[in-house]
Amino acid sequence: MARIGVLLNQHAYDLDADALSRLALSVEALGYESVWLLDSFSRDPFLAASFILGITTTLKVGTGIATVYSRDAMAATQARETLSEYYPGRFIMGLGASNEWIVGVRKGQWAPPVQKMTAYLQDMDDAELAHAKPKEMAPLHIAAHAPGLQKLAMKHGQGIFTWILPVENIRQARAFVGPDLEVTANFPVILTEDPDEAHRVGRAFMTHYIPLAYYQAAYTKVGFGPEDFEQGGSDRLLDAIIAWGTPEMIKARAEEYAAAGASRIIINPIRAADHPPVGGERDVNADWDALRQTTNLLSLA
């Protein structure tokens, strides 16, 4: 079956140290396998991972996903080996190529994802550091929605990480990478039985994703078309990439992902923001309270 983790989205980075500690400890106490940290224009995901690993005892922590444009390959290797040594068996390194807009904000020079990741992963393999290698190296997961990056994960890593993809994309990914690689599926969760509310929150969440060509390419592969990418996404597309409803309905969706080949499921619990709608992602907030209601997912592990 599938292990169940939680995405600590940007709202987790907005918390102070005490509040983040309480959140991480509560996720661990509820029985979730792991938490996953973004690499956005906010706190450093590797430093945040070290902080959370230091205050918890069994919880695994992954970067989901750290962009390779944020640090060079040797720095990434240093982070991986350091956290492997200090927290054996508990850190998972997730790396990805991000997108051209984010790289531009970072003042980086964009390169096609397969080209960039090929060179970067080889540089990581070639990196020689002064310390002894850790006895247990943290697994490396590559953000990979298409065969080119999935091939690189098969060569250099132990898994692939997918972001807001429908079940059928996961089925195709599993068929391509075979039975041995981890396949992680990450998707938003909205605890509401009101379809209008679910779609409103979902569209706000998807504001920056649906216009991106590589998401549209992934969705097109499984039967969606240009009409599904207009006006924030069709109801049909939103229903395919966002789990909403009762805890039982959300568990049923997670079971579909597990049956399609996901070995780990990462839920991103969100809800409408507390203020009147202003447009876009500002209309979405984290819903950490939902994690107590979705512990029924843990029976999938």
Image: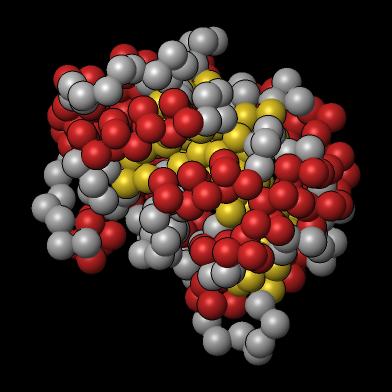
> Residue at the left extreme?
109
Q: Residue at x 51, y 39 (%)?
A: 62
Q: Residue at x 52, y 64 (%)?
A: 13
133 and 247: which is toward the camera: 133
Q: Is residue 84 above or below residue 110?
A: above
The reply, left or right, for residue 213 in relation to residue 23 is left
Q: Residue at x 14, y 44 (%)?
A: 111
Q: Position of residue 99 (x, y in %)?
A: 29, 52
144 and 6: which is toward the camera: 6
Q: Position of residue 24 (x, y in %)?
A: 67, 51
The reply, left or right, for residue 58 in relation to residue 44 is right
80 and 252: which is toward the camera: 80
The reply, left or right, for residue 30 in relation to residue 151 is right
> Does any portion of residue 207 appear in the rendered image?
yes
Q: Is residue 301 above or below residue 242?
A: above
> Does any portion of residue 266 appear in the rendered image?
no
> Residue at the front extreme?
131
Q: Residue at x 79, y 28 (%)?
A: 300
The reply, left or right, for residue 28 in relation to residue 134 is right
